[in-house]
Image (cartoon, grey):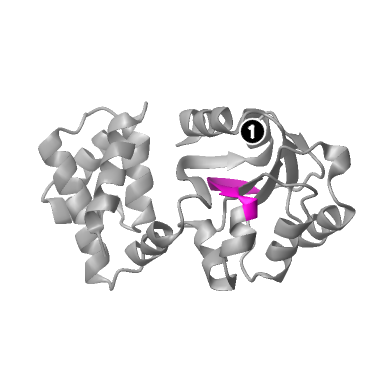
Amino acid sequence: MELRILAEKICGDIVLAEDHGKVMRKWRQIFQLSQSEMAKKLGISPSVISDYEASRRRPGVKFLKKFVYTLLESDKERGYPIISKYKYLLETETNTILDIAEYSRIVNVHEFCEAIRGEMLNDFRRNISGHTVINSINAILSLNAFEFYKLYGFSTERALIFTQVSTGRSPMVAIRVSNLKPSVVVLHGIEPLKVDEIAIEISEIERIPLLTTSHDIHKIIDELRRRFV
């Protein structure tokens, strides 16, 4: 497993973030470490970790390297439960997953809808912790049932954004027969009135908010990352 790719992703995520503290906290929580556990492994006090996560301190290159190494090593000690999930993401074809991200905070569906300039076809209260943008045609053609689980990243509490949809039926049927359910489904590039009735019915049965948007997908990704990552 190429851990360097994951290490570079985490480092880049922190360095490029507008609020590096939130992102450091996000990754610590993804790897299921408390502040005290992280501090003990780094040989510092929990208050120092708190200062970093509150952005009262800015991590230097040396500390950042040690921080990321500690995350990976702690997961190794537990048998790679978190890294193994990321391994599946690395193995997924890049032309299927257009973007995947974990958020630095919980986002409600209405805030998310506003960010993507979307329209809600129903209204269920769900929280969102990340997103995956999927080329729906490639996903349907290339992903088997097990590989479909890769789309959920580190948590099912996320928005699955399907691009290049014609009616929305296929992705919703795939979700219906899957054991894992997302917090939100977004159908990109389709008008609300053109969404298949079966797709809407499935979203109602599963109580999954169903959204549509025709906003430029690259601008959507940029906006979601700017606001929530």
Residue bearing mark 1:
111
Region of the chain picked out in magenta, as a range:
126-137
Residue 80 visible from this viewpoint: yes
The residue under the point 38% across, 45% down is 26
Dot 1 amino acid type: Glu
Q: Is residue 92 above or below residue 7?
A: below
The residue under the point 31% across, 54% down is 34
> Does residue 127 show up magenta in the picture?
yes
Instruction: Tell me residue 156's x, y (percent).
Output: 56, 58
Residue 45 visible from this viewpoint: no
Q: Quadrant of the C terminus?
A: top left
Instruction: Tell me residue 79's x, y (percent).
Output: 28, 73
Instruction: Tell me residue 108's x, y (percent).
Output: 63, 40
In front: 104, or 50? 104
Q: Is residue 115 above or below residue 183?
A: above
Q: Quadrant of the N terminus?
A: bottom left
Chief SS of the magenta region: strand
In front: 135, or 69? 135
